[in-house]
Amino acid sequence: MNEIEILINGEPRRVPGPATASDLLHHLGLDPRSVVVELNRRIVRRLQLSDTALADGDSVELVHFVGGG
Amino acid sequence: MTTVQTDPTTNTPLTIGGRSFSSRLMVGTGKYRTNDDMVRALEASGAEIVTVAVRRVDLDRTRDQGILYHLSPEQYFLLANTAGCYTADEAVRYARLAREAGFNEFVKLEVIGDRETLLPDTEGLLVAARELVAEGFKVLAYTNDDLVTALRLEDAGCAAVMPLASPIGSGLGLLNPYGIRTIKRRLSVPVIVDAGVGTASDACLTMEQGVDGMLMNTALAEARDPVAMATAMRLAVEAGHLAFLAGRMPRREVAMPSTPSAGMLE
């Protein structure tokens, strides 16, 4: 299996590729309903996750809600 | 628990951005010693709106699973904040992420200008507010106690303006009652005092200025007993609001007897 190297939350990581944003969440064990994906500073809408291909060098942010005031 | 019964014509619900809320007390979800403390304090506060923040997922799972694991979005209206943002661009980015993660188009907008006091950058705040309003957000803008900034935020289309009682997490209480009163008197949108209260009397005094509601976090989270403090705050907010509606007596520099002076023995 091939791999791609992408930045996830600022850290370089190798993940199985080719992969979509949806594959990445699955690979990381994250629930797409509780995580928002930003790819190269653009938000990937939930419905688009499985149509959004990731490429070497992409920068991905994965965020969710935490406690705050 | 008994709730004070009041004239329904005066005890109207709080309406922000076209939505009505039953409680005038909003609470944050940060810094509680345990998630159980938080859940029970939120319940005791009677709050309907609770704030949350957007942060990176911890990929190594050394931290917790995220707040939604503990909070039911059916039970609370989740208001995302842009805490920790120091520029308008950054705040807009966080607001967009929050809208995608969340359940509504409301955002508590913070653009911080100083790391020591966490006082707002009012210039950046106005820039971000205009952008987010244009994108269809209902913006609740965290600001200082300055009337002119509050007026400009209202002009920018903010759904509510949130002046501080005192710096975030300081517990110093209401430092400028006149400033808060003036903002309330001059604005048409709801005025929600956010940040700085330490205990129930601070909350009561703040509501007595006539503001529409309050948001607090540290006063509950850092209380020795957060659940008891949440109950105290719920009562204090309600008491302060009622006292404002009731209209206080005038202040006098001299005493005035409450007992008739007529009918005294010779």
Image (spheres, coloured by chain):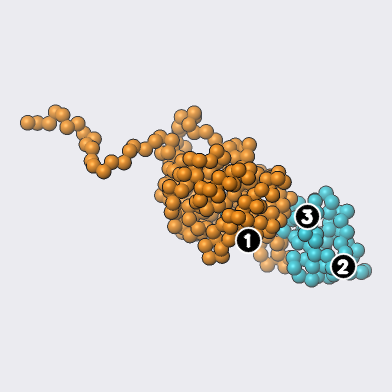
Toward the right, the furthest residue is A1
Disc 1: host chain: B
Read off the residue under disc 2: A56
Q: What element carries label 3?
A: strand
- Judge if badges 3 and 1 mark residues of a common chain: no
Q: Which chain is orange?
A: B
Q: Is residue B81 visible?
A: no
Q: Identify the residue position indicated by label 1 in the image.
A: B86
Residue at point 43% right, 48% down?
B177
Mark 1 to mark 2: distance in Å?
31 Å
Subunit of mark 2?
Answer: A
Between circles 3 and 1, the one closer to the viewer is 1
Q: In which quarter of the image is residue A56?
A: bottom right
Q: Is the residue under label 2 in contact with that under label 3 (CB below 8 Å)?
A: no
Q: Provide the letter of the chain coloured cyan.
A: A
* SS at mark 1 in the image: loop
Residue placed furthest toward the left: B266
Give the distance between the C-alpha atoms of the residues marked 3 and 1, in whole angstroms.
21 Å
Residue B178 picture location, percent across and down: 43, 47
Q: Which residue is drawn at 59% across and 43% down?
A: B154
**Mark 3, residue position:** A43
Q: Nearer the viewer, residue B246 or B255?
A: B255
Q: In this view, does B100 lie above or below A16?
A: above
Viewer-proximal residue among B186 and B33: B186
- Left or right position of B195 against B63: left
Direction from residue B98 to residue B162 in the image, left or right: left
Residue B68's disc number: none
Q: Nearer the viewer, residue B24 or B182?
A: B182
